[in-house]
Image (cartoon, rainbow, N blue to C red):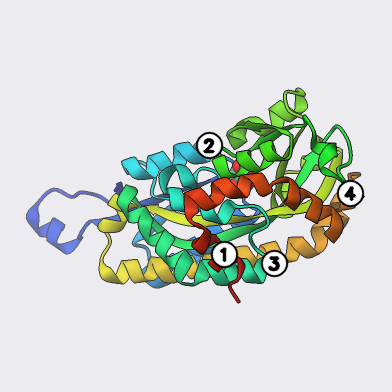
Amino acid sequence: MMFRFSGFVAAGAIVAAATPALAQTEVKIGYALAPDSHYGVAAKAFEEAVTEQTGDAFTFQHFPSSGLGGEREVIEGLQLGTVEATIVSSGTLANFVPDTGVFDIPFLFRDLEHARAVLDGEIGEEILAKFADVGLHGLAWGEQGFRHITNNRNAIETPADVEGLKIRTMENPVHQAAFNAMGAAPTPMAWPEVISSLQQGVIDGQENPLSVIVSVKLDEVQEYLTLSGHVYSPAMLLVSKPFWDGLSDEQKEAFETAADEAVVAMRGFVDEVETTGVETLKERGMTVNELSAEQKAQFQNEISSAYEGYYETYGKDLVDSIVNFE
Ligand code: PAF
């Protein structure tokens, strides 16, 4: 935990007693996207809610746009106690708590409502609690929306269209297995390298939700957008365990309430961009197509081989209980 002391340290016991030192705890919060993204909006709501409840006990310093490095590095910073808070995708979370990967299984969730209900329910809570074992404290599940494919090679309608496509995936084995099963050439890569790799043609495409595609202006480096909705993209609001352990019970309660407010802001942003994002990207010149239910079924069929591995890793019962969650 880092402390910033303000005010003067005055000489003499009488003056010191009359003017107690004002200690503010600094909260460095890092995230991969800009202040006007769903992450930025959530981080701001988080800060405001903490401040409203705790006065000036905490001072927030924001590091948007991967200002503290890739998501894996930031999470490692939390474990070391050099960074206090972050909002991250599930990209690398499974490398810290393997069970998290179950939510990354393609075609697992029907819609946002289904995903939110599972994450906010018992299954989501149980996985969140596991972060305490690895030097982290999971405050709440947020989200980015459903992921879609963008690329510069061709429009995608059938699995044959992704054959050999050099597509950047997150450093996430669940996603990599799915794109391998589709016949693509998945290239796991940390987010800060993605835009330059697209510009240089090192990769043909990438996949991310509309929230990211719009806010990062991926239309400037990508021609085709296929609304594949192949996988839901959860996010998480995490704090460092050393930081968390140093908070009083009242402060912990304030951070928990604030995390809930941050999630409301994040989901509200995602709802908005899910409604307006496609039009925005068409206006900016992207060629957009949406997979029909039949076309989606072809992709689902193509990755059925990966499902065997998912059942082995996470248990068929758990996967089925998520799929059938009402
Ligand atoms: O694709 C990713 O790595 C993530 O979705 C991103 C853009 C870093 C947001 O968390």
Note whether ligand 1 is within 8 Å of mark 2: yes
Q: Amino acid at mark 2?
A: Gly
* Disc 2 from disc 3: Cα separation: 28 Å
What's the residue at 25%, 50% (across, down)?
A: 8
Residue 197: mark in rendering = none
Percent across and percent down for residue 205 are 76, 35
SS at badge 1? helix
Q: Are marks 2 and 3 in contact (CB under 8 Å)?
A: no
Crowdedness near tag 3: few (<14), some (14–19) or many (≥20) residues, C-alpha within 10 Å: few
Answer whether residue 34 is visible to the viewer in this image: no
Considering the numbered disc 2 on the image, is that residue within a helix, a strand or a loop?
A: loop
| Mark in the foreground, 3 or 4 | 3
Q: Which residue is mark 1?
A: 320
**Is the Cβ of the residue at disc 3 closer than 8 Å to that at disc 1?**
no
Mark 4: amino acid = Val
Task: Give the image location of residue 232, x and y in percent.
Answer: 65, 56
Q: Give the CA distance from mark 3 to mark 1.
A: 16 Å
Q: Amino acid at mark 3?
A: Asp
Element type at marker 4? strand
Identity of the residue drawn at 32% across and 44% down: 81
Q: Which mark is in front, 3 or 1?
A: 1
Quadrant where ligand 1 appears: top right
Residue 70's tag is: 2
The furthest residue to the left: 13
> What residue did someone put label 3 on?
111
Instruction: Report helix, strand or loop for mark 3.
Output: loop
Q: Is residue 164 above or below residue 124?
A: above
Give the residue number, with chain letter if any, for mark 4. 288
Distance (Cα) linking label 2 and label 4: 29 Å
Give above or below for 119 relative to 28: below
Of mark 2 and mark 3, the one earlier in the sequence is 2
